[in-house]
Image: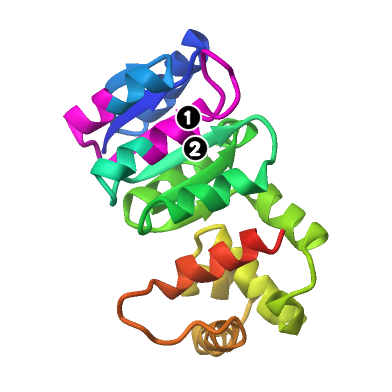
Amino acid sequence: MRIVIADDSALLREGLRLVLTDAGHEVVASAATGTELVPRALEHRPDLVIADIRMPPSHSDEGLRAAQQIRETWPKAPIVLLSQYVVISYAAELIESGEQSTGYLLKDRVFDIRSFLDSIERVAGGGVAIDPDVVAQVLVSRRRGPLDELTEREREVLELMGEGLTNSAISRRLFISEGGVEKHTQRVFAKLGLSADASTHRRVSAVLTLLQQG
């Protein structure tokens, strides 16, 4: 994959570059601010953009705002945001800014190299990958809503969908058949009011519902 990375820490940028190149990917550009990231991402149109959320000048949400600017011009831009802390609204805003290809990971996840690489490859492939800690916090703190209609197994399936797992991977994780996963998935969609509309990616919509309920 061709990747653009953005972080105000030169040390982290170099660390990410080493992890990615060791895995056979190419870092085609890097940036230290959100302002630098936008033109570089749009110039290179990489297979993936990885950006820290907090960058200069205010160190608040510059990475998220840069991602949203990129998607105003390039709606299908595959973007993974890295965050030091769980802020559920950031993940929801990023998903809402594009069609799919969205990741929101805690920075600690980078140190679990295999998990990190799996997550970014899912996003580059058009999927969604939300950090398991983010999903867990949503499930603990959520307001009453459609999610409360889900059974325990259906919530487990939705949680793993949020992490970006395919039905096959969910099947292996939960030790149930792929047919069983598909049945649970369809029930999740039905209970969340997600119709089989060809213009809507229901897995992404289900994850967005999960985040918005947090």
Q: Secondary structure at mark 2?
A: strand
State how many labels appear: 2
Q: Position of residue 119 (x, y in %)?
A: 47, 48
Residue in the foreground of this view, choosing between 163 and 64: 64
Q: Position of residue 114 (x, y in %)?
A: 51, 42
* Magenta highlight on residue 79: no
Q: Determine which residue is flagged by label 1.
A: 63
Residue in the foreground of this view, choosing between 160 and 93: 93
Circle 1: residue type: Gly
The magenta region covers 39-68
67 vs 138: above or below: above
- Give me the residue at 50% from left, 89% from top: 179
Circle 2 Cα neighbour tier, 10 Å, few/some/many (<14 / 14–19 / ≥20): many
62 vs 152: above or below: above
- The answer to which image quadrant residue 13 occupies is top left
* Magenta highlight on residue 54: yes
- Give me the residue at 24% from left, 42% from top: 73
128 vs 110: above or below: below
Q: Position of residue 18 (x, y in %)?
A: 40, 20
Circle 2: residue type: Leu
In screen coordinates, is 101 left or right of 46?
right
Residue in the foreground of this view, choosing between 26 and 83: 83
- Give me the residue at 56% from left, 53% from top: 92
Work out which quarter of the rendered image holds the C terminus and state it: bottom right
Q: Quick check: can you spot residue 107?
A: yes
Residue in the foreground of this view, choosing between 84 and 153: 84
Q: Determine which residue is flagged by label 2.
A: 81
Query: Who comes first in sequence, dot 2 or dot 1?
Result: 1
